Amino acid sequence: MGDTDKNDLRLGVKTFFVVPDLSLFPEENLKSFFLKGYETYFLDDDPYCPLFAKISLLAESFPELILFFNIDRQIQGIDWPSFIGAMQRAYGNHVTIGVAFQKRSNPEETRKLERLYLFDIGIVGGCIPLEFQKSKNTALLQNVLMANQANGLRKQLRAICSDSHKISFQIAGETFRGTVRDISISHFSCVFPIAPAIPLNTKVANIQMNLRGVLCNVDSMLCLKRMIDGNNVHVFIFLTAQGKNGLNPDQLERINLIVYNSITQTMASFLRTLFMNGRERVPTGKTFAGPAVESILESLD
């Protein structure tokens, strides 16, 4: 991954659900968040790069970061109030921290958790009691993401494409073939060896897209032409069958899946390298179970 790609990856709000309960919220459901413009991921614990080191590396890597900790998960060496309190003191000025837990049958237990984390520790991301029926949690968490402005300034997420993403279409009997540069659920940009001489606001029907083996036929309208790095870039917005901005439902699901897979694969590759390099900074024989928390964080700086 080049420096430009790394810089692009760091832009925008990143939300991580830390050691989530998959029985209440499967990873598959993250696709629906991407559809709404929320770039969300799962972060788990492993024996190679401890959780506190991962959080430290994320806080350093992403200027806009939201973390939701599943405090029902037991992690060796971690006491959640001590751990989250240390993270709030160390990173709370630029990282939004929240906690999630399985809904308690006793309302007083929930109130105790809210007092502890919201008032004593001072997190601002919220205390989220997840429902026992996982089907309800997608909408619940989406509301939490909205309240925390987890999409930042972006309405849609954009995937950077490679030379394996192709398009072709015909206008006035002439066929044009190009390469897709980037794509979202609202628009895409592309370049052509020979740029089509079509004016802005021209509607182009039946564009054939081959997005790394995934085939789509879409309608669109040319909305922008601009020069970037010597390339004449054309930007199209998607149109539905009724001629409105956007995609038909089946196309929307397919394009969103392409965006989701592309961005998550890029992030997974970045995190593997980040955490592998970060192992060297991990102090051994330390836990987050008491006052030693602060000294561990200082040793990572």
Image: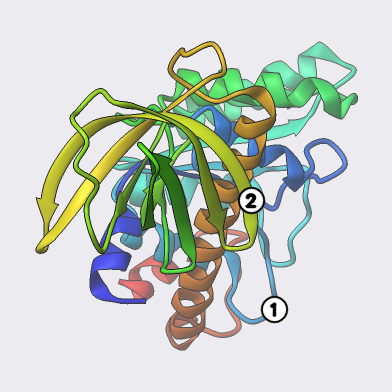
For the residue pair 208 and 296, the one nearer the viewer reads as 208
Residue bearing the label numbered 1: 47
Up-down: is 185 above or below 264?
above
Q: Residue at x 37, y 51 (%)?
A: 182
**10 Å neighbourhood of mark 2: few (<14), some, or many (≥20)?**
some
**Does any portion of residue 112 appear in the rendered image?**
no
- Image position, residue 248 (x, y; %): 61, 23
Asked if labels 2 and 1 touch by Cβ distance under 8 angstroms, the answer is no
- For mark 2, what is the residue? 215
Mark 1 neighbour density, 10 Å: few (under 14) some (14–19) many (20 or more): few
Type of amino acid at the residue the image marks with label 1: Pro
Q: Amino acid at mark 2?
A: Leu
The answer to whether 288 appears left or right of 73 in the picture is left
Say whether disc 1 or disc 2 marks the residue closer to the N-terminus: 1
Q: Where's residue 214, x and y in %?
A: 64, 55
* Residue at 78% over, 55% down: 74
